[in-house]
Image (cartoon, helix red, strand yellow):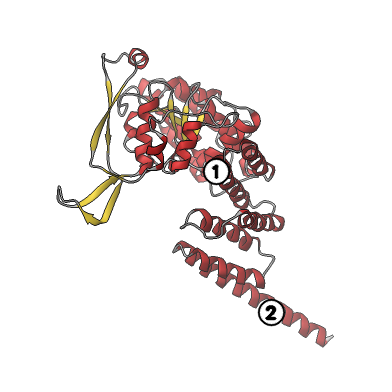
């Protein structure tokens, strides 16, 4: 009996030691990752997994860090389909140990998205559809995110071009187009991805049955030769079509004057023509200018309100808030009556389908779930406009809708903050 007790104590002590070592290795790995030392971080996690193979976070981090190593660092020599499959295996292991691991499902979808871009590059429509179905089947697009994607797409005018902010809004919208045939009239573009020549060419060509093409105003040779362009802050004049001129009652021959600032600075080369470092226009911003210039008179252009403003290059002064997205107008809207579309805000706040929103309580993806606070911001935007108009009835309807749809207990502190703000208006 004494011997059994000693063995149990030894086993318990050994387990504590292993968990302690696992924790220490995991923390070291996180520090290495934050310093962009992906190989070192992955090596430490593998050591930890050998000691405590039942820790789901270890496999989640292995999938997460391996994903970054392949797509967010310098080119990974030897990358192939098997490397991608290893990422799926890590995430599958994490989910087998913890089926409610929302961020593991998110990164499973992100890895599917990385594969999707490979299939776009090869113009393989069937494979593109298949990989988005794989992400859906794994739960990468829970019902609250599907609902959110539909609300984003429905906020856009017919035949629009929509610049998405990233994986959180781009992938679910692509899934909806490819598998639910939902708003296939829209071309969805991840705004941070347009610095890649092959992708700009892909957008120019389109993919029948999958991605509607856009105009770029560039030849294939110009696209393939994209590079940082010498640039100083310059006003780009964009002619506006007669249709837009009439629609917005603009003066004849009105042009959109867009002050485009450089977004790259050389730390090595001095500019001989003027003092200071040389400044450049990044390929991403240069292509954005081209797309706007080539399409503003032909197709409505929208930006996800989840997109980072640093990608907009000053276009925020020309945007009209429509709730989840903003519409690009051919004149400055900031601090004007055109800064928001009341009809769009009212439709989103007062008439939108939120029947699946509370599902976020069960299928929370901490890494991206915060995008749903675009809903709350839309409620505040509409309330402020009712306040400006002195419409107390409208304010009451916003508050009532917020109570009904937004106060679900997902983030009580944030929900209460937005609610109290609206109440005080």
Which of the numbered marks, if any, corresponds to residue 244?
Answer: none
Which residue is label 1 attached to? Answer: 117
Q: Quadrant of the C terminus?
A: top left
Q: Is 305 placed above or below 370 here? A: above
Which residue does the numbered mark 2 point to in the structure image?
14
**Mark 2 to mark 1: distance in Å?**
46 Å
Q: In the shown orientation, is residue 423 left or right of residue 142?
A: left
Relative vertical location of residue 247 with respect to residue 115 in this rendering, above or below = above
- Residue at 67 percent of width and 57 percent of height: 89
Q: Quadrant of residue 10 in the image?
A: bottom right
Q: Residue furthest right?
A: 1
149 to the left or right of 228? right
Assess whether mark 1 and mark 2 are in contact (beta carbons under 8 angstroms). no
Could you say where residue 373 lies in the image, as x and y percent from the top left? 49, 39
**Nearer the observer, 155 or 213:** 213
Quarter of the rendering occupied by the N terminus:
bottom right
Looking at the rendered structure, the secondary structure element under dot 2 is: helix
């Amino acid at each position: 009996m004494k011997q059994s007790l000693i063995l149990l104590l030894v086993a318990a002590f050994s387990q504590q030691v292993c968990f302690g070592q696992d924790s220490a290795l995991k923390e070291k790995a996180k520090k290495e990752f934050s310093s962009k030392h992906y190989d070192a971080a992955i090596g430490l996690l593998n050591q930890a997994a050998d000691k405590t193979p039942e820790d789901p976070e270890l496999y989640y981090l292995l999938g997460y860090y391996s994903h970054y190593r392949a797509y967010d660092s310098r080119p990974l020599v030897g990358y192939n389909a098997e490397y991608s499959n290893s990422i799926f295996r890590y995430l599958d292991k994490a989910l087998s140990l913890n089926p409610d691991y929302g961020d593991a499902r998110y990164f499973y979808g992100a890895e599917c998205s990385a594969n999707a871009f490979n299939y776009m590059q090869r113009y393989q429509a069937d494979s593109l559809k298949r990989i988005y179905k794989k992400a859906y089947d794994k739960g990468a697009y829970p019902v609250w995110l599907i609902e959110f994607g539909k609300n984003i797409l429905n906020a856009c005018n017919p035949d629009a071009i929509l610049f998405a902010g990233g994986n959180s809004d781009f992938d679910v919208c692509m899934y909806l187009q490819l598998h639910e045939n939902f708003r296939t009239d829209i071309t969805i573009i991840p705004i941070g991805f347009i610095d890649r020549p092959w992708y700009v060419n892909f957008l120019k060509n389109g993919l029948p049955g999958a991605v509607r093409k856009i105009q770029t105003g560039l030849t294939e040779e110009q696209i393939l030769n994209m590079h940082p362009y010498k640039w100083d802050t310059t006003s780009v004049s964009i002619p506006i079509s007669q249709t837009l001129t009439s629609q917005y009652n603009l003066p004849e021959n009105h042009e959109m004057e867009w002050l485009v600032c450089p977004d790259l600075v050389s730390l090595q080369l001095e500019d001989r023509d003027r003092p200071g470092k040389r400044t450049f226009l990044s390929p991403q911003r240069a292509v954005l200018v081209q797309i706007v210039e080539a399409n503003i008179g032909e197709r409505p252009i929208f930006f996800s309100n989840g997109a980072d403003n640093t990608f907009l290059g000053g276009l925020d002064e020309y945007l009209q808030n429509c709730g989840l997205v903003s519409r690009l107008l051919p004149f400055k809207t900031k601090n004007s009556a055109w800064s928001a579309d009341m009809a769009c805000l009212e439709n989103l706040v007062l008439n939108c389908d939120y029947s699946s929103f509370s599902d976020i309580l069960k299928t929370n993806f901490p890494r991206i779930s915060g995008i749903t606070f675009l809903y709350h911001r839309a409620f505040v935007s509409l309330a402020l406009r009712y306040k400006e108009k002195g419409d107390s009835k409208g304010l009451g309807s916003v508050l009532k809708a917020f109570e009904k749809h937004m106060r679900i207990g997902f983030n009580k502190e944030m929900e209460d903050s937005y609610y109290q703000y609206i109440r005080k208006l």
